Amino acid sequence: MTLKLGVPSKGRLMEKTFEWFGARGITLERTGSEREYAGRVDGIEGVNLILLSAGEIPRELAAGRIHLGVTGTDLIQEKLALWEQLVEPVEPLGFGHADLIIAVPHCWVDVDTLDDLDAAAAAFRATHGHRMRIATKYHRLVREFLQAHGVADYALIDSQGATEGTVANETAEAIADITSSGETLRANHLKVISDALVLQSQATLWRSRTAETDDDEAAVMEKMLARLT
Ligand SMILES: Nc1ncnc2c1ncn2[C@@H]1O[C@H](COP(=O)(O)OP(=O)(O)OP(=O)(O)O)[C@@H](O)[C@H]1O
Ligand SMILES: O=P(O)(O)OC[C@H]1O[C@H](OP(=O)(O)OP(=O)(O)O)[C@H](O)[C@@H]1O
């Protein structure tokens, strides 16, 4: 059988992943029409390229349906409970750097730290009769972080995209999302809580701990890792 390599199917993450492998003599490319998610690997025998949503790569690695996969640390840690038992980081790729942070409206002049946020959350509940809402797609990571830092008076609202817009749209009072240049936060009049860095993420090559590997695949894996690490 062939070794299965899962990489993001579109956008900057796909392009940079292709460049990273290319620089190590392994050419990845999309084949077929622009909309067809099929791919080819040149420069090494016995590897099958699987193009997937970055958000699905953690699950495919954990289920052992792919042997190797590229995705961000944030998505691995959010999507997989006990991720260390399911996947092993092989190599950080040096791109896709993003910080998972918590941000509040710029006009909340008294709220700069987690202690301030905790106080604001209690005051918010007393005034409005419901909990301060934090919009995010990183439910597990944010819940664990706030629990560890003693903030309890909040409700998580699910937001799978355009999260920074939820505050202006009045569906949340705060957000937890990744930021890179900070432009999206600025454009949406939000500021970062200074001590609320939940996670620093970057694109990383992961190896499944659960995927079954026959002798041929094991030999290809050894060759791949020698080239990539
Ligand atoms: N602005 C950014 N700068 C750097 N890295 C980013 C940025 N936005 C997202 N990422 C990283 O890219 C990875 C994929 O992010 P995301 O889930 O938003 O991708 P997507 O393009 O929406 O993919 P899909 O919808 O197919 O799952 C994540 O690990 C994330 O940390
Ligand atoms: O700090 P910046 O450089 O502005 O980047 C941060 C933005 O990038 C990501 O969004 P993406 O473009 O992936 O869209 P999304 O809102 O659909 O997740 C992320 O969710 C932030 O919104």
Image (cartoon, rainbow, N blue to C red):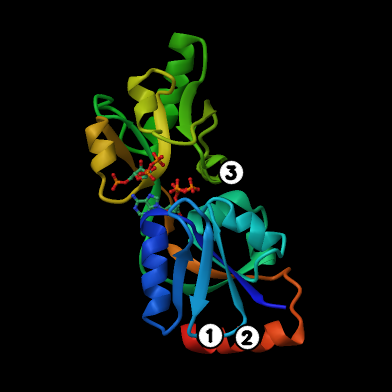
**Does the image show residue 229?**
no
Tell me which image quadrant ligand 2 sits in. Answer: top left
Foreground residue, 33 or 56?
33
Graded by Cα atoms within 10 Å as few (under 14), some (14 to 19) or many (20 or more), the crowding at tag 1 reads few
Q: Is residue 196 above or below residue 170?
A: below
- What x and y, as percent, mark residue 153? 53, 26
At horizontal 41% and vertical 83% (from top left) the residue drawn is 24
Residue under pointer 3: 140
- The amino acid type of the residue labelled 1 equals Ile
Disc 2 to disc 1, C-alpha distance: 8 Å
Residue under pointer 1: 44
Q: Secondary structure at mark 3?
A: helix
Disc 2 to disc 3, C-alpha distance: 35 Å
Q: Is the C-beta separation of discs 2 and 1 under 8 Å?
A: yes
Q: Is residue 37 above or below residue 143?
A: below
At horizontal 50% and vertical 43% (from top left) the residue drawn is 149
- The amino acid type of the residue labelled 3 equals Arg
Earlier sequence position, callout 2 versus callout 1: 1
- What x and y, as percent, mark residue 32? 48, 60
The response on whether ligand 1 sits within 8 Å of label 1 is no
Residue under pointer 2: 220
Earlier sequence position, callout 1 versus callout 3: 1
The response on whether ligand 1 sits within 8 Å of label 3 is no
Earlier sequence position, callout 2 versus callout 3: 3
Foreground residue, 132 or 218?
218
Disc 1 to disc 3, C-alpha distance: 38 Å
Q: Which-is-in-front pick, marks 2 and 3?
A: 2
- The amino acid type of the residue labelled 2 equals Val
Q: Is residue 8 above or below residue 176?
A: below
